[in-house]
C-alpha cells in the first residue's frame, strides 16, 4: 500500500519547535508589543492630532508608516493573540493545580497539570515536580530537573523561629 509523502519541515519551523520552552515568553512579548503599537498609533492618529502635526512640520512622508503600524499591528495581533491566550489559559490551569494541597485532587488533575507544564517549559515542570515531592507523589522520569517550590521562592518566606532564637 502506498504511503503519503512525509511533510518536510523547514529550518525555521524546526528551530521554532526546538525552542518550545520559550514559546510562552515569545507570545507574551509579541502580544504586549503589538498591543502597545496599536494603542500608540491609534492615539497618535485620532487623539493627539499626529497627522496634522506631521503635516505642519513638513513630514508628510511619515503618515503612511503610522497607518502601517496600526494596520500591521492589528493583523499581527490577530495572529498572535489567540496563541497567547491559549498559553495563558494553560498557565492558569497549572497555577490552580499548584495551589492545591489535596493529594487526591492533584492526582485527579495530574494529566492536565503535566500537559500544561510540558507546554510552558522547564521552570513550570520543575514547580510541578516540587508539588509532587511535597505531596509524596511519584515523579515520572521525564522530570529529571531539580524541583522548585510550587509557589514563590523559599527565600521570600519567613522562617519560623523559636522564642530563644529571637534575642
Image (cartoon, rainbow, N blue to C red):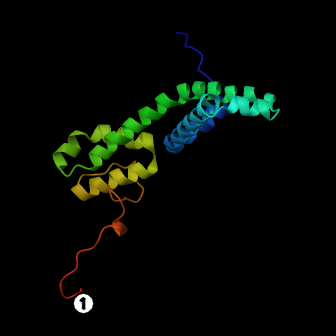
Using the image, determine if residue 12 lies above or below residue 146.
above
Residue at horizontal 28%, vertical 53%? 132
Where is residue 136? Give x, y as percent. 22, 56
Using the image, determine if residue 99 lies above or below residue 148.
above
Along the line of sight, which residue is nearer the eye, 69 or 52?
52
Secondary element type, mark 1: loop
Where is residue 90? Give x, y as percent. 37, 37
Along the line of sight, which residue is nearer the eye, 114 or 29?
29
Residue at horizontal 22%, vertical 49%? 100
Q: Residue 54: which quarter of the image?
A: top right
Q: Residue furthest top?
A: 1
Residue at horizontal 45%, vertical 50%? 122
Along the line of sight, which residue is nearer the eye, 144 or 165?
165
Dot 1 surroundings within 10 Å: few (below 14), some, or many (20 or more)?
few
Give the quadrant of the C terminus. Answer: bottom left
Q: Which residue is mark 1?
A: 167
Along the line of sight, which residue is nearer the eye, 51 or 2?
51
41 displayed left or right of 105: right
Q: Residue 93: which quarter of the image?
A: top left
Residue at horizontal 27%, vertical 73%? 159
118 displayed left or right of 2: left
Using the image, determine if residue 125 lies above or below residue 81.
below
> Is there any visible trace of residue 77 in the rendered image?
yes
Amino acid at each position: 500500500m502506498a504511503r503519503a509523502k512525509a511533510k518536510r519541515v523547514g529550518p525555521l519551523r524546526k528551530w521554532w519547535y526546538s525552542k518550545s520552552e520559550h514559546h510562552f515568553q515569545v507570545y507574551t512579548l509579541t502580544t504586549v508589543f503589538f498591543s502597545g503599537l496599536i494603542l500608540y498609533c491609534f492615539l497618535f492618529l485620532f487623539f493627539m492630532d499626529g497627522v496634522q502635526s506631521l503635516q505642519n512640520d513638513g513630514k508628510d512622508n511619515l503618515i503612511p508608516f503610522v497607518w502601517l503600524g496600526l494596520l500591521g499591528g492589528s493583523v499581527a495581533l490577530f495572529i498572535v493573540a489567540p496563541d497567547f491566550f491559549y498559553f495563558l489559559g494553560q498557565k492558569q490551569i497549572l497555577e490552580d493545580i499548584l495551589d492545591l494541597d489535596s493529594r487526591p485532587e492533584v492526582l485527579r488533575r495530574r494529566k492536565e497539570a503535566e500537559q500544561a507544564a510540558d507546554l510552558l517549559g522547564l521552570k513550570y515542570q520543575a514547580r510541578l515536580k516540587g508539588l509532587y515531592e511535597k505531596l509524596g507523589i511519584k515523579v515520572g522520569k521525564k522530570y529529571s530537573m531539580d524541583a522548585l517550590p510550587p509557589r514563590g521562592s523559599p527565600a521570600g518566606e519567613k522562617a519560623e523561629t523559636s522564642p530563644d532564637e529571637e534575642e
